[in-house]
Amino acid sequence: MPKKIIIIDGGPRKTFNTAAMLQKFAEGAKSVSVDIEVKTVRLYDLDYKGCMSCMACKVKGRASNICKFKDALTPVLEEIAQADGLVLGSPIYFGQITGLMQAFLERLAFPWLSYNDYSLTAPKRMPVVLVETMNGLPERNNSQGYGSMEYCITTALGEPQHLIAYNTYQVKNYDRYELAGFSEEAKRQWRDEHWEQDLQAAFDAGRRMAEAV
């Protein structure tokens, strides 16, 4: 039976930094075997909300570790429950993952949580990679990454691998925007030195996950 890796793209731009990293990850995973199915889901293409506090996942006798609220996210959550690997990718805005990624993680993780003993149990454990792309530098950034949700992921699914691309381009042409606080020359130099390495790291991570599942 083919193994399946689900990639969740939590960024708004279809061809920019986060999307490019996730595309390279997918290419790396697919390079291992034709029996590896890799599916990318773009959250910005879906109409959904965060946890609705309906508590349907906690009903006695019918408790579920998959969200029971029905909307466009439902089939994605059901697929993840049966997947063999999970990749989450988000740009960092104001030190946080995007609002849509946070809403997705609420729906993913709240059903894992038992209010009987406060354990966290996913339908199955699997390798996880967390991807962040950000404007900050390694020594100077305000990123909180995936925040408290990383604890839920680690406990329920397993210790995640991190891929972080720093000091990424915000736009293609800095002359068009009010971005005088940034040096395009410095950005370009960093990108020339690091971006291909970041993409290669994503490709290699994809290969490793495909080999592990």
Image: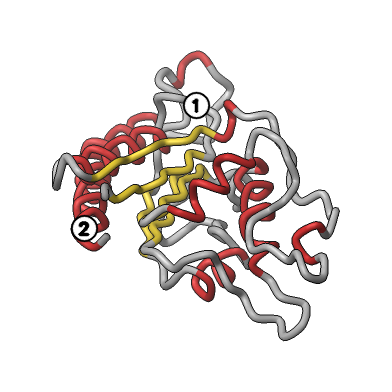
For this view, does 69 lie left or right of residue 27?
Answer: right
State which quarter of the image contains the C terminus. Answer: bottom left
Total count of labels: 2
Q: Residue at x 40, y 24 (%)?
A: 15
Front residue of this view, candidates 167 and 204: 204
Q: Is residue 141 left or right of residue 204?
A: right
| Image position, residue 96 (x, y; %) | 61, 52
Q: Residue at x 55, y 30 (%)?
A: 12
According to the image, label 2 marks what residue? 208
Please give left or right for residue 113 compared with residue 60 in the image.
left
What residue type is disc 1 on?
Arg
Compared to residue 173, the image places residue 44 above or below, namely below
**Of label 1 and label 2, which has the lower sequence position?**
1
Quote the CA–CA distance across marks 1 and 2: 26 Å
Residue at which label 1 appears: 13
- Splitting the image into 4 quarters, where does residue 177 fall? top right
**Quarter holding residue 53:** bottom right
In this rendering, does residue 74 appear at all? Answer: yes
Kind of residue at disc 2? Arg
* Residue lying farthest to the bottom in this orientation: 117
Give the residue at x 62% y 29%. 46
